[in-house]
Image (cartoon, rainbow, N blue to C red):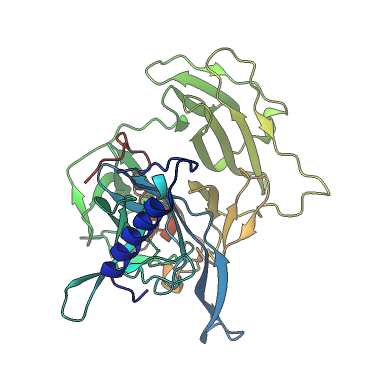
Amino acid sequence: MKKLFSQVVIAMIAAFSLTSCLSDNNDYDTTYYTDTAITAFSLGTLNLTNHTLAHDGVTDSTYTSTFSASSYTFDIDQYAQTINNTDSLPKGTDLKHVLATISTANSGTVLLVLKSKDDKDSLAYYSSSDSIDFTNPVRIRVYNMLASAYREYTVKVNAHNESENEFSWNATPIDNYAGIESRQFVSQDDQLFLTGLHKGATSVFENKATSWNKVDKSFAKDDNVIGTTKKYRYGIIDGKLMRATIDGSEWTEEKLDEDASLLPSESVSFIASPMVNDPSLYNLLIIGNANGKTVTWSKVEDDGDKSQTWMYYNEDEYQKKTLPYLDNMKAVLYGDSIVATGGDFSQVYTSPDWGLTWNKSTLLKLPTDFGNQAAKFDMAVDKDNYLYISRDGSATVWSGRLSQLGWKEEQKTFTRSAARRK
């Protein structure tokens, strides 16, 4: 690591001269390439500092472990001459001591561009067995076989500044709070509003980051509708599950695999999620309360015919992790899980499998200041993956975001990748 570039050049020239001197008519010709590039970059086993809570749930402690970083892909942009990982390494990764494997085209020689104490550049040999400090971007050069030209790359190793499962609630006041009831979040043009009733009139509040301010705005409301997709509206009308097109007024009855008496009659939540393999189709879920218990239905939306039937989630002796009955229950899709709460708000439940099984969540547990008295409330998720919740009788809207849902996905595809000689 401490050998300077002048020694590298001398060694390369000497090797070339020696090869020339030893050549005779019986030797094979040696081809020397004048171009080169870095063709692959990967990491080895890295150190990781982990933070954990002691048994008392308060004391923070740390321990060090190792993990293989070979699965983290590094993208090489030959046009911009940059190398970086789009999937960041975990929080706590030791970037000061990193082992890297670098491959080159045409037997190129790799050198590191280092900064001396007087801020001058110096070059040093690269070795896959020597660690590199990647706490800041590192410049790496690859020289051709004749040392007559090189390409220089800037390598950035990305690591998260927060763990993927961090979540905290933030309180935002409702300006000029006037005891609004029957609260409901409404999304319009990717913006979230809070509506509610006060003295028989509907008030609308807009999120201004530091407070929710009352605005002169109104929303059309159809009490028959429990939820919508891009093409259809759904409603429970006269005890039947119905569907209508977004711009139509004619309702048609949906097919059920169980009796309609098992449809929810209160605290109804409708969840729609585009299918991964065909975003034009939706996975649908209806969950709510009926006759003192939680009931759940699901189907895949089908606009071709009515062959798709709503499936009722039957209770059986094998299904142990069910969602308990919760007064005023509300459920939303958050990330890859469904989140539900209600009752005295002592528990928040999550389902990773579309409502089949439920677990108590310690990560999303509501703050003490939210209150523990049963009340009507609403919950929603905005376009930036923030989870919002507000209850009747409170002058506050609570919000938070799971850390991993705030991470940006960086560019992974580059259209120009041909190596250029410098």
* Residue nearer the viewer, 198 or 111: 111
Q: Is there any visible trace of residue 398 in the rendered image?
A: no
Report the front residue among 351 and 185.
351
Q: Position of residue 195 (x, y in %)?
A: 31, 47
Q: Compared with residue 416, is residue 411 higher up or lower down, i.e. above or below?
A: below
Q: Is residue 291 left or right of residue 154?
A: right
Q: State the residue in front, 308 or 145.
A: 145
In the displayed structure, 114 sits above or below 342; it is below
Coordinates of residue 62 in the picture (x, y in percent): 52, 82
Image coordinates for residue 393, horizontal then vertical, percent: 37, 62
Task: Say which quarter of the image contains residue 284.
Answer: top right
Residue at 41% over, 26% down: 230
Figure check: 137 above or below 228? below
User: Left or right of 306: which side holds 186?
Assistant: left
Q: Is the residue 20 above or below the residue 134 in the image? A: above
Q: On the rendered image, what quadrant is the N terminus found in?
A: bottom left
Q: Nearer the viewer, residue 96 or 306?
A: 96
Outermost front residue: 25
For the image, the number of numbered tags is 0
Residue 400 appears in the figure:
yes
Q: Residue at x 56, y 20 (%)?
A: 302
Residue at 81%, 45% (x, y): give it: 316
Image coords of residue 23 (percent x, y): 43, 48
Residue positioned 39% across, 30% down in the render = 222
Q: Check the image and name the residue furthest to the right.
A: 317
In this rendering, position of residue 280 left or right of residue 384: right
